[in-house]
Amino acid sequence: MRRGATDYVLKDKLSRLGPAVSRALRDAENRRERARAEEAQRKLSRAIEQSPVSIVITDRSGLIEYVNPHFCELTGYSVEEVLGQNPRILRSEFTPPEEYTRLWETILSGKVWRGEFCNRKKNGDLYWESASISPVLNSAGEITHFVAVKEDISERRQADQALKASEAKFRAMIEQAAEGYALLDEDGILIEWNQSNERIWGVKREDALGRLFVDIQFQVVVPERRTPERYEQLKAMLLDALQTGQSPIFNRLVEGEMCRPDGRRIYIQQSVFPIKTEHGYRIGSMTLDVTERRLSEQK
């Protein structure tokens, strides 16, 4: 009797032990998952706090709920000054209102907006940002927040503007030069052809740009040498020069006779040179009309 009662008690305990172990295992796994989630959240928080770009989180109406330290460092505003504010406090007159309209239309439709702003710091200084603004959705698919990741590109913009100014100055100098100037891209296509080249070669800028240089070159070969074999020879020389950056005529003065499209024969002096690029070689040339000198020498 006593043994039967003992067996019953053991069976009862064993029957409850299984579920208890299962619960303990589930609880342990849940704790591990929570710990992993908390660690992931800590890593994400540290990444945002230490990020070298500005991160701004707003509610659905656009009011700021969070900014990271880099935002404050860049703009000069403290966290307390911007919380509850609209990011328009940074807005300058150099970003068109239509750009903000497109921004809101994009993010309210659930899409990511990417673009550039010219904003103003607290001290009044202007700066440029490249921004990516994404909507945050809840489980029901409703927009609850927006996250903006913004990089200061002021130095890059200034460098771009300086480069454009330098290019404009160079182009003005080239256009005013007495020498004809031509530039071929890595495929042998003409991308520069100044006014002096128009005058010397008798070929308009609009008729030269975008064409293979060898076609223009063959067009002015003197008639007695204008043969299919000569065209293939010129083409092979050009392709080899573009691929290797080397040619017998590079970096030396060469003179020759050409026949313009209007039939007039002239003598030219030319300097041809390679320009190394990331994608191969470009070729530039400077040309002078030396017809008068050559004719006087022949007398």
Image (tube, rainbow, N blue to C red):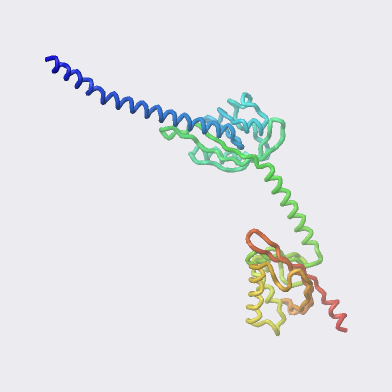
Residue 205 at what x, y percent from top left?
71, 66
Q: Residue at x 67, y 60 (%)?
A: 277
Number of numbered discs visible in the structure rendering: 0
Image side of residue 45 versus residue 155, left or right: left
Q: Nearer the viewer, residue 244 or 124?
A: 244
Is 68 or 257 nearer to us in this picture? 68
The quarter of the rendered structure image containing the C terminus is: bottom right
Q: Is residue 147 left or right of residue 220?
A: left
Could you tell me residue 174's position as x and y percent?
77, 61
* Location of residue 123 in the rendering, given as x and y in whole percent from the top left corner: 72, 31
Residue 56, position in %: x, y? 57, 33
Kindly give the residue lying farthest to the top in the view shown: 2
Residue at horizontal 43%, vertical 35%?
141
Q: Residue furthest left?
A: 1
Q: Identify the image quadrant of residue 121.
A: top right
* Residue 157 vertical placement versus 253 (above, below): above
- Where, by quadrant of the figure, is residue 1 drawn? top left
- Pick out the residue farthest to the front: 3
Q: What residue is shown at x 55% (from left), y 27% (from top)?
A: 65
